[in-house]
Image (cartoon, rainbow, N blue to C red):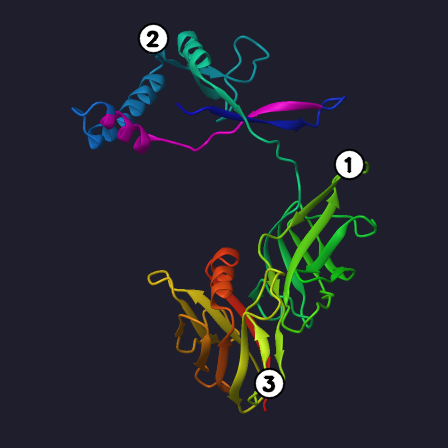
Amino acid sequence: MATIQWRPGVNALTTPLSYRIQAAPRRTVGYKEMAADLASANPHFTEEMIKSLAPLMMEWIQTQLINGNQVTFPYAFSFSVSFTGKLDRHDDPLPDDDDMLQVNARPSRPFVQTIRQMAKLERLPMIEKAPMISLTEDTKLKLADVLFAGGVLKLMGSNLDFNESSPDCGCVIAGTWGGLRKQSVYALVANSTVLLVPDIPEQNAPWQNEYAVTLTTRYSEHGALRKGTCGRKLRSPLRVTSLSPGAETGILTGGGEAAAPYASIIDGTASGHEMLRVQAVIDSRSGQLLLSLLDMEEEGRVGAAVTAAANGDFALEGCSGSAVSSLVVRINDHAALLSLVRNSYAGRLVDILDVLPA
């Protein structure tokens, strides 16, 4: 038998501070779950039969209440109607209020006592109010999880509001390989949205382009500082300055532990300057790593996917109409790249490439 879970919650209406005991339902169940459980325990009743009878029973109770009756199921529930409002005189008409008529459902004492006697309670950790950054987007490139020096970063979530003048509050962008910068230029600070012009810290090597975004706030004058970090890492564009053989640009690396890039661009052909994206995605059927080039729009043009099953060089074709006709990607550490894509990026890792012609 499962436990009834609960957690403490702050009771802001009391002085001195106290805490409420909050029930935490595991899930919400209804006719479907009831029918499945009862049919399993009583094989002579089918699941469909029980599922069809339950709404009919509720409809019957509703009809009895409409007809002015009270419904009582011994050792279970009692259903009745009541009224809200008042009359100034005994012969006044009823108020013209649709909400005046109320429906009450009251459990019987034996029903409640059985639950109290048999239930086991489980304490959960207290949840404190804190900033939650659920989505990020560069408003110029219109791409999620991107840090672009020429754009505006949009943070979306809840409880994000903070006092810009407070030295302890604000947004910090930190590189996973080092480098940290507290942000200073904000276009909007609100509870569900923050807009800022990103000041991106430099990291130790050009291919180190993975960042974490953390917001710190205080919800009352003397309250504790609360922090929230975006669950997804952000990535900044990588400059590809040369496509000649021998020149390498590290890509598709993260985690702050790599001594060298997991993959590199080692060659390619471009007729002009262009920004595009390179994608590493795990095929859901084969589990293999697929590489491809994308344009700069979500759900936009995609180049042919190439399977990368081990370390080696892989030629990727550009999208139709792209100034970049091909790029050669060398995978230096296939196992580390596969692990990064699977465990840190939910099966899909994308880098933006700012490619200059040879």
Image depth: mark 2 or mark 3 in front: 3
Which residue is under mark 3? 247
Instruction: Classify residue 111 as left or right of residue 12.
Output: left
The mark nearer the N terminus, 1 or 3, is 1
Circle 1 crowding by C-alpha within 10 Å: few under 14, some 14–19, many from 20: few
Circle 3 crowding by C-alpha within 10 Å: few under 14, some 14–19, many from 20: few
What's the mark number on residue 251? Answer: none
Image depth: mark 2 or mark 1 in front: 1
Which residue is under mark 2? 74
Which residue is under mark 1? 223
Asked if residue 283 can be seen in this view, the reply is yes
Q: Is residue 232 above or below residue 55?
A: below
Q: Secondary structure at mark 3?
A: loop
The mark nearer the N terminus, 2 or 3, is 2
Report the magenta residues as a range: 18-40
Q: Examine the structure image and report whether residue 24 is included in the region drawn in magenta.
A: yes
Q: Secondary structure at mark 1?
A: loop
- Between residue 311 and residue 244, name the one nearer to us: 311
